[in-house]
Amino acid sequence: MQATKVWKAVTRDTVDFLDELIEILAEQDIHYCVIGGQGVNAFATPLISLDLDLVVASEQIEALEKALPARFQVEKFLHSWNISVPGSDLRVQIQTDPRYFPFVERASERDVLGLRLPVAAIEDVLQGKIWAAADPERRSSKRRKDLLDIERLLESHPRLRSSVPPEILHHLSNL
């Protein structure tokens, strides 16, 4: 549980936003999984981040919206929702791009910085990172972080290299 305390300290989550969100998901029996950088952390040496990216089962997105307390701030974008709360620097993003929905059914529980959470399969985490790194609409700094996450996954799981497109591999160093 020490990693969770560090993560909460880094995100300055003084209002237990993370705990409350996970509790709401469990109480409402909402099926979800961790993706993004924290998903990578479940399969490679973890890095601390203020972000937590999730995908919810497609048929449960409306239920999630109704279950979120009024004190949560929800900003909706084309393919995601950003959820935040005053008193925490934790940034939760719910992915609503339909490409991610199948990830939920292939997820399994893993350790994410001291918490047992459903995490997308490693192949799905990698695929999400490939989509993000190849997205020309994303800021260049975000795409570089996605490339780093792909590199971290390949260092820990070299068998995945054949799943990465050559144009992405070209950008990775020392592989």
Image: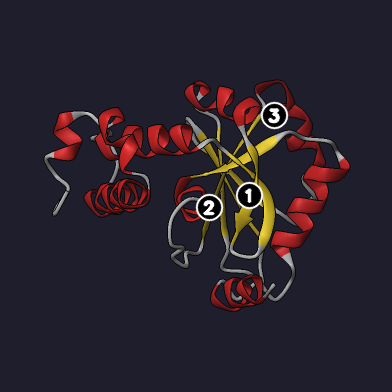
Q: Who's the residue at 52% across and 21% down the image?
A: 98
Q: Give the answer, above or below, for where 110 lies relative to 56.
A: below
- Element class at badge 3: helix
Asked whether the beta carbons under mark 1 and mark 3 sit within 8 Å of each other, the answer is no
- What is the image's colouring? secondary structure
Q: Which residue is mark 1?
A: 110
**Image mark count:** 3
Given residues 47 and 88, the one toward you in this image is 47
Residue 42, labelled with which disc? 2
- The label shown at residue 159 is none
Q: Residue at x 43, y 55 (%)?
A: 44
Instruction: Decide if residue 130 is on the left or right side of residue 136.
Output: right
How far across and down, in percent of the image, does residue 28 sit?
A: 85, 38
- Residue name at image x 56 percent, y 68 percent: 89
Residue 102 position, x and y percent, is 57, 22
- Does label 1 or label 3 sit earlier along the sequence? 3
**Residue lying at 30% horizontally and 29% vertically, measured from the top left:** 163
Q: Quadrant of residue 113?
A: bottom right
Q: Are marks 1 and 2 in contact (CB under 8 Å)?
A: yes
Crowd rating for badge 2 (residues with CA inside 10 Å; few <14, some 14–19, many 20+): many
Q: Is residue 65 left or right of residue 26?
A: left
Residue 61 circle label: 3
Q: Earlier in the sequence, mark 3 or mark 2?
A: 2
**Please, what is the three-letter code of the amino acid marked with disc 1?**
Arg
